[in-house]
């Protein structure tokens, strides 16, 4: 007869050691197995193993954290400026892999414009104190390098040029030549226009001196970022982890045409994990049939964007009778039942119950009960809609708009019921 192994019976130190060899995502999931696994998965020993070596040197003395997990999550959400503010550093939440942005001060930027047409400015929404502002140029060349030893091993990276365009004049005619590769090697090459595709239009040849080229299928266009900047993919690089003394170089060149082009603001070059590497991991956290919940999937560039959107922007389902979102840390499903989805019975004539629209409500209508003596509210949800192995709490969400003195005639309160929340 074969026996069964109760993993919870293992010593706490053994469980901690096992979890430390997994990933941050696995640690969050394993914390739900049992009380012993939760204690191990929340320990500093586990989350300290997910932090980069010598992380203490990266944390300003002004910041303090109650646990290594809190520190890890902060490094995922709040990029740190390193190397005297010339680089930005953060961790990818799911894997703990290292990501960077090289500031424009950390890049080599050469252009045809005279010195007075190239300035350093501060702008809202930038990650660095200064960004490069280039005006009325005929050509430019941007190069950036980072030591391969700073990157996470066995990781597929992509590099992105992050910029803003204040004047598209001339930029729609000729694409920028982009490349990413180890110094001394060929690397990957591609082309991209700096003007978004939706804003392109044909120009007659006499305005640019030659026929405007038609973009090929392999030519890219910039995409809008959530921080208000544009980014264009420069290339990709797989760090096998067997080379520590080399450098990764990224370049962007626009040397064709010879005509004066518009104004550009360069924030820097971002080096982060490839979307293909992340999509499988992030999709595993999304609920089944998530495609039916999102109105416009085309507006998201990755599964991570979908997950983060569902974690911060609840969507209405079932004809607007329920609101649905994901807990950002665990990926567990949460709901809010609208008052239209509830059974509401109260004292008084029908005119003492109204449906109104109000600012700040998640639904189009909320229920208002006037002069309440008694009421009964009931709501139901299918258990199959909830996440398994999850401890939920339910909350009644309401406002007391006006308090009235309680007297012998039974005068009560004017109450506005928004919904019931389950999370």
Image (cartoon, grey):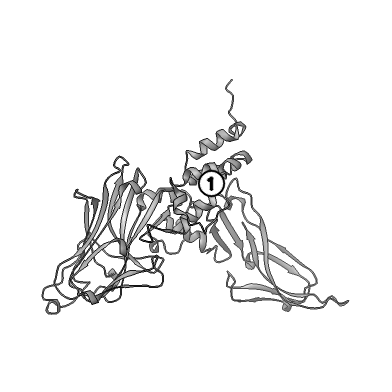
Q: Position of residue 109 (x, y in %)?
A: 24, 65
Residue drawn 22% across and 72% down?
171
Q: Nearer the viewer, residue 58 or 101?
A: 58
Q: Is residue 123 left or right of residue 423?
A: left
How far across and down, in percent of the image, does residue 193 sit? 24, 66
Instruction: Say whether residue 19 is left or right of residue 132.
Output: right
Is residue 322 depicted above or below 258 in this figure?
Answer: above
Left or right: residue 423 compared with residue 147? right
Q: The residue tagged with tag 1: helix, strand or loop? A: helix
Where on the picture, by quarter, is residue 134?
bottom left
Residue occupying the far top of the picture:
1
Q: Where is residue 133 in the image (x, y as percent from the top left)?
A: 29, 72
Q: Can residue 135 be seen in this view?
A: no
Q: Which residue shows up at 30% across the image and 76% down it?
A: 166
Left or right of residue 38, residue 172 in this image: left
Identify the residue under disc 1: 28
**Quarter assignment of residue 169:** bottom left
């Amino acid at each position: 007869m074969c026996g069964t192994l109760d993993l919870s019976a293992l010593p706490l130190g053994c469980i901690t050691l096992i979890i430390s060899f997994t990933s941050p995502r696995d640690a969050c999931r394993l914390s739900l197995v049992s009380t012993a696994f939760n204690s191990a998965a929340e320990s500093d020993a586990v989350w300290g193993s997910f932090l980069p070596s010598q992380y203490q040197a990266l944390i300003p003395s002004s910041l303090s954290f109650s646990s290594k997990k809190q520190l890890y999550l902060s490094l995922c959400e709040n990029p740190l400026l390193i190397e005297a503010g010339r680089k930005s550093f953060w961790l990818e939440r799911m894997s703990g892999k290292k990501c960077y942005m090289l500031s424009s001060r950390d890049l080599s930027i050469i252009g045809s414009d005279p010195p007075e047409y190239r300035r350093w400015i501060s702008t809202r929404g930038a990650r660095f104190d200064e960004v490069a502002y280039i005006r009325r140029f005929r050509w430019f060349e941007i190069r950036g390098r980072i030591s391969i030893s700073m990157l996470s091993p066995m990781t597929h990276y992509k590099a992105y040029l992050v910029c803003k365009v204040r004047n598209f004049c001339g930029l729609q005619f000729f694409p920028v030549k982009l490349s990413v590769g180890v110094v001394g090697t060929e690397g990957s090459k591609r082309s991209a226009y700096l003007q978004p595709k939706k804003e392109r239009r044909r120009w007659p040849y006499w305005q640019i001196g030659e026929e405007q080229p038609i973009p090929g299928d392999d030519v890219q266009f910039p995409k809008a970022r959530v921080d208000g900047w544009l980014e264009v993919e420069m290339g990709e690089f797989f760090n096998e982890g067997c080379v520590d003394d080399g450098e990764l170089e990224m370049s962007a060149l626009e040397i064709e045409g010879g005509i004066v082009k518009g104004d550009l603001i360069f924030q820097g070059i971002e080096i982060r994990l490839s979307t293909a590497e992340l999509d499988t991991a992030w999709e595993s956290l999304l609920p089944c049939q998530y495609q039916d919940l999102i109105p416009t999937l085309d507006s998201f560039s990755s599964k991570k964007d979908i997950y983060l959107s569902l974690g911060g922007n609840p969507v209405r389902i079932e004809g607007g009778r329920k609101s649905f979102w994901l807990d950002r840390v665990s990926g567990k499903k949460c709901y809010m039942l609208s008052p239209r989805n509830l059974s509401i019975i109260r004292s008084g004539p029908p005119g003492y119950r109204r449906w109104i629209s109000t600012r700040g409500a998640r639904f189009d209508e909320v229920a208002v009960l006037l002069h309440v003596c008694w009421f009964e509210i009931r709501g139901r949800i299918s258990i199959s809609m909830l996440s398994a192995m999850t401890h939920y709490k339910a909350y009644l969400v309401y406002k007391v708009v006006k308090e009235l003195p309680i007297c012998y005639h039974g005068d009560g309160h004017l109450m506005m019921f928004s919904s019931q929340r389950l999370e």
